[in-house]
Image (spheres, rainbow, N blue to C red):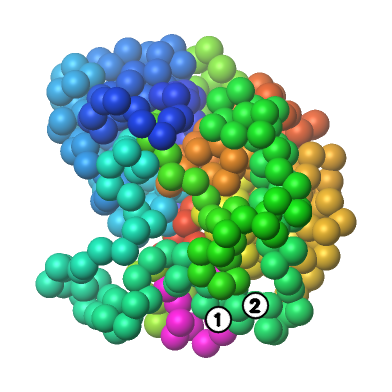
Amino acid sequence: MSLSGKAAIAGIGATEFSKESGRSELRLAAEACLAAIRDAGLTPADVDGLVTFAADASSEIAVQRELGIPGLRFFSRVDYGGGAACGTVAHAAMAVATGQADVVVCYRAFNERSGHRFGQAGAAARADSTGLEFSWHLPFGLATPAGWVAMHARRYMHDHGATSEDFGRVAVAMRRHAASNPRAWFHGRPITLAEHQESRWIVDPLHLLDCCQESDGGVALVVTSAERARDLPHPPALITAAAQGTGPDQMMMFGYYSGDLATLPAMGAVGAELWRRSGLTPADVQTAILYDHFTPFVLIQLEELGFCGRGEAAAFVAEGGIELGGRLPVNPNGGQLGEAYVHGMNGIAEGVRQVRGTSVNQVPDVTNVVVTAGTGVPTSGLVLGVS
């Protein structure tokens, strides 16, 4: 059974993005979900499915109670941190396409700046397979996402001659896009390449401005059938393709045993499935929403998805390829580096706005958008298209 075109994103909602929300994560989740339901022209009574991340603090039944949803016919949690973002939509779309639910809300909400900060090192107390994986690294100080990504970044630099300035150009482009986005935390605050280079080191070769921000906030998406979505207030964003994937010898948060540290095999697998399932090619995409938790992985994603060849992403970026007006505008909302870090869910919302034609940084003549989730982990991706 093909999923293509059977489901669509009909509503999007979000809280403000801040560094201290001043309210609980459950309230953030409820606010974002209610905003998305209203955006779709529906009510909580219409919702019969909820999907979120394994790391979300707000359970499906808690969100159900807060929203006043009478009952759920489908609920699901997708694992592996930010790699789950597009997977939530994939699960929702499968539920809708197979009749398990009629209206599914995908959500993510957290106080990632004022509460638990994912970027800080901490002791691992998990007596499970993931804890076993971490035991190879944490005792030796390799304990933060920046440290894990730095290993990949340094290998990519060694293999392809990329430089810190090449990574910095990604940050500059994302902040430039965010500067004209009123929803973005860094609205009105672009940076220069010199400022990137002068920002403090986090883990060599990553500067502070190579790392995405920490944010408080919530984002939600409403998924329903394509047929029903066409009767709702906004042009639907058709889910043309959805995929999840892992690489060889996959581990959580790092892929040091996949054979080539300068690549992202899980993203390559997801990209291949997206093109196969959609029948599209990279040439058919007008804009991409790439998971930009760290700048080096934007370069590698461009290569894994086929937008340029191996080792060619630095030149692609240097030529302005990812900027508005470039060959492939990336993250017109500013991404996680510029708008907010909500585990990629705000990126999916931007993909929907691009399809609707309502983005503050609208790319002309959008018919297809590719969206990716977290990299370095088991991951997921989407192709969204016009109805």
Left or right: 386, with 50 as reference point = right
**Mark 2 or mark 1: which comes first in sequence?**
2
Q: Looking at the rendering, which quadrant does residue 245 occupy?
A: bottom left
Q: Is residue 68 visible?
A: yes
Magenta-tinted stretch: 254-268
**Residue visible at 68% across and 78% down?**
157
Is 243 placed above or below 160 here?
Answer: above
Front residue (pair 305, 18): 18
> Please, what is the three-letter code of the amino acid marked with disc 1?
Leu
**Residue visible at 25% across and 64% down?**
122
Front residue (pair 185, 254): 185
Magenta stretch, main secondary structure, is loop
Front residue (pair 332, 178): 178
Q: Quadrant of the C terminus?
A: top right
Is 83 placed above or below 230 here?
Answer: below
Residue 260 lies within the magenta run = yes
Left or right: 156, with 204 as reference point = right
Residue 67 lies within the magenta run = no
> Are the residues flagged by discs 2 and 1 in contact, CB closer than 8 Å?
yes
Which SS class for mark 2? helix
Left or right: 101, with 216 as reference point = left
Which SS class for mark 1? loop
Q: Looking at the rendering, which quadrant does residue 264 occupy?
A: bottom right
Left or right: 149, with 319 as reference point = left
Task: Name the residue that disc number 1 marks.
Answer: 261
Circle 1: is it few (<14), some (14-19), or many (20+) Cα within 10 Å? some
- Residue 219 in the image, given as x and y percentages of width and height: 41, 32
Task: Name the residue that disc number 2 marks.
Answer: 156
> Please, what is the three-letter code of the amino acid marked with disc 2?
Tyr
